[in-house]
Image: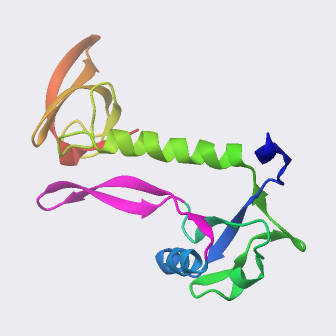
Amino acid sequence: MISSLLPARPWYVCFTKPRREALAVRKLEEQGYEVFLPFLTQWQKTRDGWSRKQQVMFPRYGFVRCSRCEQSIAPIRSTPGVSGLVTFGTVPAALDEATLEAIRSLVERQAGGAAADGACPFQTGDAVDISAGPLKGLSGVVSAFAGERVTVLLTLLGREKPVAIPTGHLTLT
């Protein structure tokens, strides 16, 4: 009951310097602010196969809020790695807890899918386009995957046929 009487502490949108999100987060946390920097896992094709790479969901943006009600947001703009707060005129852009929780749950769902075993970005049921090879330009649905090959169901001559295609020739649609 007491917590409902306390004023809500909004999350502010922080604008960082290019590729300095991690520095800004660290320095803001050192000053006692709560910080949220969402990351996404992206698949990247390398010479040795597929690998996962973490990247910031919103490049140059993070979310920050005061840990205590009496804490000021003024020091944020002079924090190393931070360009300033996003504002509308002179009013800092703020998010409510529900919006931030929706972003958190999106990140957690995506991270849960990326943590699945296997070194292939394709999952059964994914829609894919063939981007190279003799079947370039066709689309299909992944039915199985193993190592460097993915079995894709293609509609050829009015019938669905499973075709094994190298992973490097596919892109998710």
Question: Disc count in the image?
Answer: 0
**Quarter holding residue 32:** bottom right
Q: Is residue 81 left or right of residue 95?
A: left
Q: Residue at x 78, y 65 (%)?
A: 69
**Residue 40 drawn in magenta:** yes
Coordinates of residue 157 in the picture (x, y in percent):
25, 14
Residue projecting furthest to the front: 2
Coordinates of residue 84 in the picture (x, y in percent):
71, 80
Coordinates of residue 91 in the picture (x, y in percent):
88, 69
Residue projecting furthest to the top: 159
Look at the picture and state if 166 lies above or below 48: above
Quarter the N terminus occupies: top right
Coordinates of residue 104 in the picture (x, y in percent):
54, 47
**Residue 133 drawn in magenta:** no
Q: Residue at x 41, y 38 (%)?
A: 173
**Quarter holding residue 10:** bottom right
Q: Is residue 96 left or right of residue 154?
A: right
Q: Residue at x 73, y 74 (%)?
A: 85
- Which residue occupies the foreground of this view, 137 or 142? 142
Secondary structure mostly seen in the magenta stretch? strand
Q: Residue at x 20, y 48 (%)?
A: 168
How is the structure coloured here?
rainbow
Q: Is residue 93 left or right of residue 40?
A: right
Q: Which residues are magenta?
A: 32-57
